[in-house]
Image (tube, rainbow, N blue to C red):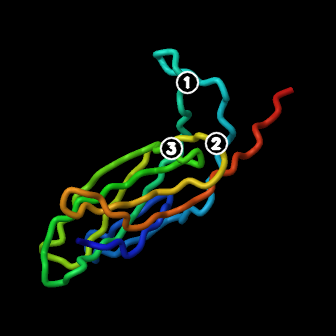
């Protein structure tokens, strides 16, 4: 099974095609969106989770536990809100057959908001038929005051 070496939540990640160098832009420990309205409803009439128009990316680097064992690793990422509920869930595969390490990128077009507080990207890797926790990336959401209109 592979292990999570490091992860970062940022606004943008750029990979140089020639050198494979990675540039991370604006690593995020805190996000400051405006406070969303409390009474948003979806097309079905149920309460909707607001999505802040905040494009961002989660970058993780994984490494083989056993450098002699090549494998394809199944990775799961879950964004957990301060309410302890799952907001986003994604799965990816990383091919570690030819290289001992690899990167995964999770591009987010927006950020679901369920209140201020600590949000966490929790990562798991599949071992057999079960998922094993590999690590997490926490960040804070702090609303900025909405402007007063006179």
Q: How many marks?
A: 3
- Circles 2 and 1: CB atoms closer than 8 Å: no
Q: Quadrant of the C terminus?
A: top right
Q: Residue visible at 29% across and 63% down?
A: 125
Neighbours of disc 3 within 10 Å: few (<14), some (14-19), many (20+): few
Element assignment for label 1: loop
In percent of width and height, residue 115 lies at 64, 42
Q: Nearer the viewer, residue 81 or 105?
A: 81
Q: Residue visible at 62% across and 56% down?
A: 140
- Circles 3 and 2: CB atoms closer than 8 Å: no
Say left or right for 76 vs 8.
left
Of callouts 3 and 2, which one flags the residue occurring earlier in the amino acid sequence? Answer: 3
Task: Using the image, tell me which numbered label, if any, was put on residue 115.
Answer: 2
Q: Nearer the viewer, residue 5 or 18?
A: 5
Of callouts 1 and 3, which one flags the residue occurring earlier in the amino acid sequence? Answer: 1
In percent of width and height, residue 109 lies at 44, 44
Neighbours of disc 1 within 10 Å: few (<14), some (14-19), many (20+): few
Say left or right for 70 vs 90.
left
Q: CA distance from mark 2 to mark 1?
A: 14 Å
Task: Using the image, tell me which numbered label, if any, was put on residue 85.
Answer: 3
Res. 16 image quadrant = bottom left
Front label number (3 vs 2): 3
Q: Is residue 31 above or below residue 135?
A: above
Neighbours of disc 2 within 10 Å: few (<14), some (14-19), many (20+): some
Element assignment for label 3: loop
Element assignment for label 2: loop
Front label number (1 vs 3): 3
Task: Using the image, tell me which numbered label, if any, was put on residue 3.
Answer: none
Which residue is disc 1 drawn over?
47
Q: CA distance from mark 1 to mark 3?
A: 15 Å
Say left or right for 85 vs 38.
left
């Amino acid at each position: 099974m592979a292990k999570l070496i490091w992860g970062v939540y940022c606004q943008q990640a750029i990979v140089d095609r020639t050198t494979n160098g990675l540039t991370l832009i604006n690593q995020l420990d805190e996000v400051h969106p405006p406070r969303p309205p409390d009474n948003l409803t979806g097309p079905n009439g149920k309460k909707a989770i607001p999505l802040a128009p905040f494009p961002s990316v989660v970058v993780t680097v994984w490494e083989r536990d056993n450098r002699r064992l090549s494998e394809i690793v199944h990775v799961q990422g879950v964004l957990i809100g301060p309410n302890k509920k799952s907001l986003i869930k994604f799965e990816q595969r990383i091919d570690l057959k030819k290289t001992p390490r690899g990167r995964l990128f999770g591009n987010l077009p927006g950020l679901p908001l369920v209140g201020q507080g600590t949000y966490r990207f929790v990562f798991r890797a599949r071992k057999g038929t079960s998922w094993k926790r590999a690590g997490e990336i926490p960040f804070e959401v702090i609303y900025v005051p909405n402007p007063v209109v006179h």
